[in-house]
Image (cartoon, helix red, strand yellow):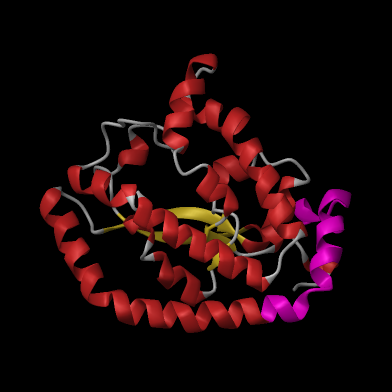
Amino acid sequence: MRKWDDLPKSMRNDEVKKYYDILQHKKMSLLFKRLFDIVFSVIGLILSLPFLLIVAIAVKIDSNGPVFYRQERVTRYDKLFKIYKFRTMIQDADKVGALVTSKNDKRITRVGRVIRKIRLDEVPQLINILKGEMSFVGTRPEVKKYVDKYTDEMKATLLMRAGVTSEASMKYKDEDEMLNKCVKKYKSIDQAYIEEILPQKMILNIKYIEKFNLLADVGTMLKTAANMFRR
């Protein structure tokens, strides 16, 4: 971990300090977490390569545009990076609508709708994990627009790498349906997400930081895999 004085100024507040001190006592666990990420991201990329090629071909045939969708997100220490995902929406979808998707979003392609159901669009994030931009388990990376709305306590989630999955991700796997239900109270889907969904998810994400341990991470990964096969 970085020294406290080396953190971005926006993160150096009393709320973040509480969680920083907790993680300072878990340096070895954080080291093993990174080693785990490296080993299993390499294994995952090797084993999934033939399957990834099939999905890539399906995405390309289904609609015009690149195979991968690369959007700027925020990870550890408020650092920007480009996330890898299979493209599931029309090209330049974020320029013609909200940054979050709702149920029956017309921007989602036919192939995209299928692979989103079982989260296959997330598999290319193994590349982000190997590069050290993400981890298997952690707070889902948000776009800068939403991170700028974080409270001081929410910024504590930036002490760890963003993750592919988490308890919050599983609980809010049907986020698009939840947004549909509450969007009528707000001016836009973006506002509904910032004021309704994001604060609820962050309660779980902050709890994860507070109680982090590697065995719990493995449990979260297994539950995520089980949920994918049940869908």
Quadrant location of the N terminus in the rendered image: bottom right
Q: Is residue 14 magenta?
A: yes
Nearest the viewer among 225 and 84 is 225
Residue 127 visible in this rendered orientation of the protein: yes
Q: Residue 127, relative to residue 39: is it above or below?
A: above
Identity of the residue drawn at 21% across and 62% down: 55
Q: Residue 174, relative to residue 191: is it above or below?
A: below
Q: Residue 8, relative to residue 107: is it above or below?
A: below
How far across and down, in percent of the image, does residue 189 sit?
A: 47, 27
How far across and down, in percent of the image, does residue 159 sit?
A: 71, 62
For the stretch drawn in magenta, the main secondary structure is helix
Nearest the viewer among 134 and 212 is 212
Range of residues picked out in magenta: 9-31
Q: In the figure, residue 78 lies in which quadrant?
A: bottom right
Q: Is residue 227 left or right of residue 79?
A: left
How far across and down, in percent of the image, does residue 83 sit?
A: 44, 59
Q: Is residue 147 left or right of residue 28?
A: left
